[in-house]
Amino acid sequence: MKRQGRAATPVGMLSMTDENGQLRQSTMTFQEATTTSQSALDALFEAWTQLRSIVTQHESALSRRWSKKTNKQRKELLSQAWPEMPPMHRPDFEVLRDKAWGKPSTARTDLALRFPHLNLEDLSQKTYLLLMLNSRSRNSPATFTNADRDSLRIGMRTRWIVPQHMLGYTMYLNGQHTRATYGRIVPWADGMGLVIFEIQRDVLQFLVRCAGLILHDTPMANLLNTSTAAASILKILPSTHVETSSRTSTTNQESLTAHALEGPYRAPDVSNFERLECLVDAKCGEVQDHFLLVREDPGYFAELLHEACDHTSEAVLNCHYDPHSIYLSETS
């Protein structure tokens, strides 16, 4: 079987600590994996079909209404669609900091590690939720397999997310754009495929709730006209333009920062050499500006030196909050 992108994603499930704080069992049988994956697949594709139906019919209304809301109104809507949503950008890093200081886990810890890009700070802005609605509805779940797996990196390393493995089998996700083949379990190896199912299912259900809340005056039954959206082949629908901040209006140059912020909400690019060229041009321009400022702006040069000095290991206090010995020798 021909596979696209990375190797097939191995079988697994999202297994964390139980009610006693102990890690759950890390293995599962073939029957357990099949039953669990079928249930997750049904919920995943039901949510995806609903989202595609809503967005393809009402995307202009969604964009118009979302753009008119204030930042406070957007946060209230997001909190209604997903209670306990973390407030800050990249909440998974906040979890790492809390863990380092010995702070206890909360209800938001799970959300922060499983869905680090679903947070009030980012999604309450004008662009990102619209980008996510557009990309997730117009591309099959297989498109986001690698991106969703990569987003779990910190949760996996902190052992908050522990996959359940079934030795001897694997689950095909990448490049499987039909309902019959996406998530098919075949003999191969071990791994974590069901993790992706649960992540994608919850993200799509969240987006459906958001769309329903934005279009609150339209009955959900009218929004979910799934007669044209339930085809067995998951066709990639033509995308509509969503205004973003990744290009500046003066130079038409790709902003690396804006592109990085928008990345989790876009459909992943595959061999898009025009976009790669645009990013390289942006980086070249950034490096050229840096060298010009270093040569011509003494203040910028001094700022770089101070920043480099502040970030050396000698500038970090030790465990007794005392400065490094080189600083003590300078004062003595």
Image: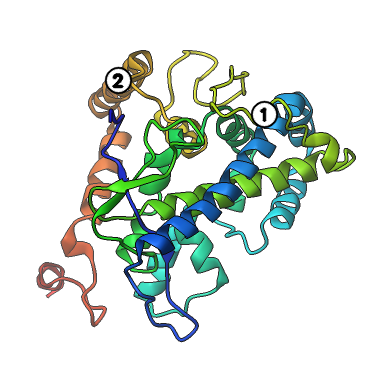
Query: How far across and how far down the image is residue 36, in percent?
Result: 48, 59
Residue 243 in the image: above or below residue 313: above
Q: Name the front one of labels 1 and 2.
A: 1
- Residue 201, horizontal then vertical, whole percent: 56, 49
Which of the two residues, 135 or 127, is positioned nearer the viewer here? 135
**CA distance separating discs 1 and 2:** 38 Å
Please, what is the three-letter code of the amino acid marked with disc 1? Ala
Residue at image mark 1: 229
Front residue (pair 183, 57):
183
Picture quadrant where residue 3 is located: top left
Q: In the displayed structure, does residue 236 sit left or right of residue 5?
A: right
Q: Is residue 231 visible?
A: yes
Q: Is residue 60 above or below residue 90?
A: above
SS under mark 2: helix
Q: Residue at x 59, y 32 (%)?
A: 131
Residue 303 shown left or right of residue 83 in the figure: left
Q: Position of residue 223 (x, y in %)?
A: 80, 35
CB under 8 Å between discs 1 and 2: no
On screen, residue 121 versus residue 18, left or right, reads: right
Residue 201 marker? none
Q: Which residue is mark 2?
A: 280
Q: Residue 207: which quarter of the image?
A: top right
**Residue 91 seen anywhere in this rendered image of the structure:** no
Q: Inspect the image, locate mark 2, and give the three-letter code of the amino acid beneath it.
A: Val
Up the image or down, 111 lies above or below 273; here it is: below
Quarter holding residue 329 = bottom left
